[in-house]
Image (cartoon, rainbow, N blue to C red):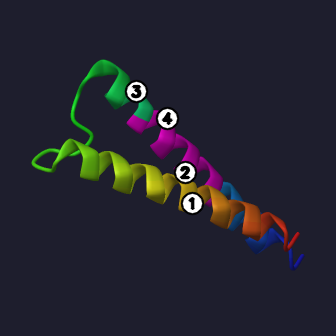
Amino acid sequence: MESAPAIFAGLVFALFGAALLVWTGTRLRQGLPVADGVDRAVSVTVATGVGVVALVLAAWCFTWV
């Protein structure tokens, strides 16, 4: 029972991180801005970084299972 919160948090982080990385890659491939009003390089870097951090947090949560 103690591992249920870790599984839930890990799934949330994994889904968010994967979705953010897929969305960022799709926007880049289509040549559309990742964030309106922000430099393209900065928005891609921040979005990719947040996606990777979310996946790392998901992996860390799954180690508690």
Name the chief secondary structure element in magenta: helix
Give the residue displayed 57% in from the left and 44% down from the top.
Answer: 18
Amino acid type at image mark 1: Ala
Is residue 17 part of the magenta span, yes or no?
yes
Residue range in magenta is: 13-24
In what element is the residue under mark 4? helix
Label drawn at residue 26: 3
Image quadrant assignment for residue 63 = bottom right
On the image, the x and y values in percent for residue 21 come to 49, 41
Label whose residue precedes the other's in the sequence (4 or 2): 2
In this rendering, the answer to whether 29 lies above or below 2 is: above
| Category of crowding for the residue at label 3, using alpha-carbon neighbours closer than 10 angstroms: few (below 14), some (14–19), many (at least 20) | few
Question: Which residue is tagged 4?
Answer: 22
List x then y, in percent, for residue 8: 71, 63
Q: CA distance from mark 3 to mark 1?
A: 18 Å
Q: Are marks 3 and 2 in contact (CB under 8 Å)?
A: no
Q: CA distance from mark 4 to mark 3?
A: 6 Å
49 or 4, which is in the foreground? 49
64 above or below 41? Answer: below
Q: Secondary structure at mark 1?
A: helix
Q: Amino acid at mark 3?
A: Thr
Image quadrant containing the C terminus? bottom right
How many residues crowd mark 2 within 10 Å: few (<14), some (14–19), many (20+)?
many
Q: Earlier in the sequence, mark 4 or mark 1?
A: 4
Residue assigned mark 2: 17
Question: Tag 2's secondary structure?
Answer: helix
Label 3 SS:
helix
25 lies above or below 62: above
How many numbered marks appear? 4
- The residue sitting at the bottom extreme is 2
> What residue did someone put label 1 on?
54
The numbered mark, 3 or 1, whose residue comes first in the sequence reads: 3
